[in-house]
Image (cartoon, rainbow, N blue to C red):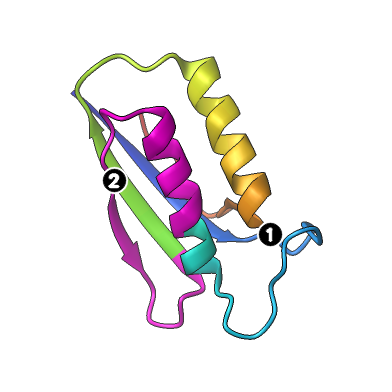
Amino acid sequence: MEQIELHLVDDPANACVYKGPGHYAATRAQAAVHRIEQAFPHLRFKLASDHQLASLRATAVVDAPIESDAFIAVLSEAMSATGTRMASSRGSIRA
């Protein structure tokens, strides 16, 4: 078994997604994770946001093979659609 860990934060370069009052990076990131779960029904992420809702950590155990290119395509689309990106700090994805 392997583990996927994502640390999602706001993408300030994505101006296509509304980010006004009441719209937090963690809640938008949660929507991105749900898109991933819809594409890969056997994945279930445990979610944890910081107290300011500025970031979201999502962790899942992978017990069945996932095609890397398909996962990256879904992840990229989900982050773009929600105005989020991977945090640049140490090892955002572990697999």
> Which residues lie in the magenta part?
30-55
Task: Tell me if residue 38 comes above or below residue 16 in the rendering.
Answer: above
Residue placed at 37% from the left, 17% from the top?
A: 66
Q: Is residue 74 magenta?
A: no
Mark 1 residue type: Asp
**Direction from residue 37 to residue 10 in the image, left or right:** right
Image coords of residue 95 (percent x, y): 35, 29
Task: Tell me if residue 15 comes above or below residue 93 in the rendering.
Answer: below
Mark 2 residue type: Phe
Instruction: Count how many numbered circles sit on residues in the image.
Output: 2
Q: Could you tell me which secondary element the residue under label 1 belongs to?
A: loop
Residue placed at 63% from the left, 37% from the top?
A: 77
| Residue 11, disc | 1
Residue placed at 36% from the left, 43% from the top?
A: 5
| Residue 45, disc | 2
Q: Does the magenta stretch include residue 49?
A: yes
Residue 14 visible in the displayed image: yes
Task: Tell me if residue 66 comes above or below residue 77 in the rendering.
Answer: above
